[in-house]
Image (spheres, rainbow, N blue to C red):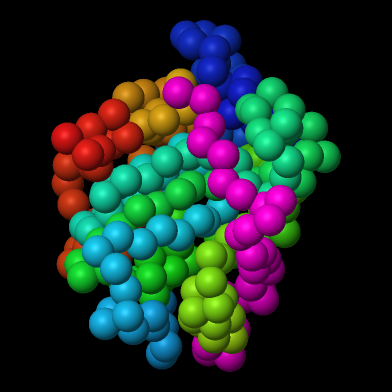
Amino acid sequence: MMIKQTLFATGAVALAAFAFFGGGVGMSLAEEKAVKLPPPAMDAPATAQAARETAVFAGGCFWGVQAVFQHTNGVLNAVSGYAGGDKSTASYNMIGSGRTGHAESVLVTYDPKVVSYGKLLQIYFSVAHDPTTLNRQGPDSGTQYRSAIFYKDATQKQVAEKYIAQLDAAKVYPDKIVTQLTPLGGTIAFYPAEAYHQDYATLNPNQPYIARFDRPKIANLKLVMPEVYRDKPMLVSQAGR
C-alpha cells in the first residue's frame, strides 16, 4: 500500500488521510527511534579507493533515505531512484504494483577520504530504516519498500555481509536483519526517479508524511552520529556546483 501517494494531496484531505492511517503531524519526532550501532569490524580499505565511490541502498520510501545521506558529511550527491527491475518499468506509477522487481533506492556518491562505505552502512542500518521488517517500512508495504543493498563489487558485498552477521550476532535488534544483498550489473542497474522526487524532504518539510516519517530520521542522524552530520544538505539540484 503506497500511503505516501495519498499524502501528495494537500490541506484537509492529506491530514484526514494521514490520521486514518494512524499517524499525525503533531506526534513527537522522538517516536521515530534510531538504534545505536557499533561500527563495522571490517570496512573497505581507503587506500584502494578512488576520489569518488558509489553505493546503492534501498530502505522504504526513498524520500527519507535520500534526506539522511544528503545530511551526511562526505556525501557528494544522493539521488532517489529505482533498482532491481527492468529499465522499462523504472517509473513511480509502475513500481507501485509491487510486481516490477524494483525497490525504491538511493544512489549515494561519496568521498571515501571523508566517509567510508562501512560508515554509510552504519548510518543505513541505524538511522535510515528498520532492516528487520520484511517488505515494509513504516506505513508503506510491498516489495518496492524492501530493505536491500545493491553492491557494485566483491568488497562492498563482503563488508555488507560481515556487518549484517556482526549486528545479528550482537543482537542489536529484537529480530534478525532481512536486508537483501543484490549485485549491480547486467540487467540490474540503478535508474534515477522522476525530478519531482529529488530533494523532496527538503523542499516539503511540512508535508504530513515527511513530518512524521522522514524529518525524525534527520534529527536522529544528528543525535546518534553528530560526527558525520551536516546541517546543510547536499541537494541534487546543487550537486557539482
Q: Residue furthest front?
A: 186
Q: Which residues are magenta?
A: 166-195
Residue 19 location, quadrant = top right
Residue 190's spot in the image, x, y percent?
A: 57, 46
Is 113 left or right of 33, judged from the image as shown? left
Residue 147 falls left or right of residue 68? right
Location of residue 4 in the rendering, given as x and y in whole percent from the top left corner: 59, 29
Q: Is residue 42 above or below residue 225?
A: below
Visible residue check, residue 216: no
Give percent across and percent down for residue 228.
Answer: 22, 63
Q: In the image, what residue occupies the spot 58% across and 90% down?
A: 169
* Quadrant that contains the C terminus: top left
Residue at 48% across, 39% down? 80
Please tell me which residue is depicted at 32% across the width and 46% down the height of the picture.
Answer: 77
Q: Position of residue 197 (x, y in %)?
A: 47, 28
Q: Is residue 66 visible?
A: yes
Q: Is residue 140 magenta?
A: no
The image quarter in which residue 23 lies: top right
The N terminus lies in quadrant: top right
Q: Nearer the viewer, residue 215 or 70?
A: 70
- Give the residue at the far right of this rendering: 99
- The residue at the point 48 percent across, 66 percent down is 125
Closer-to-camera residue (183/179) = 183
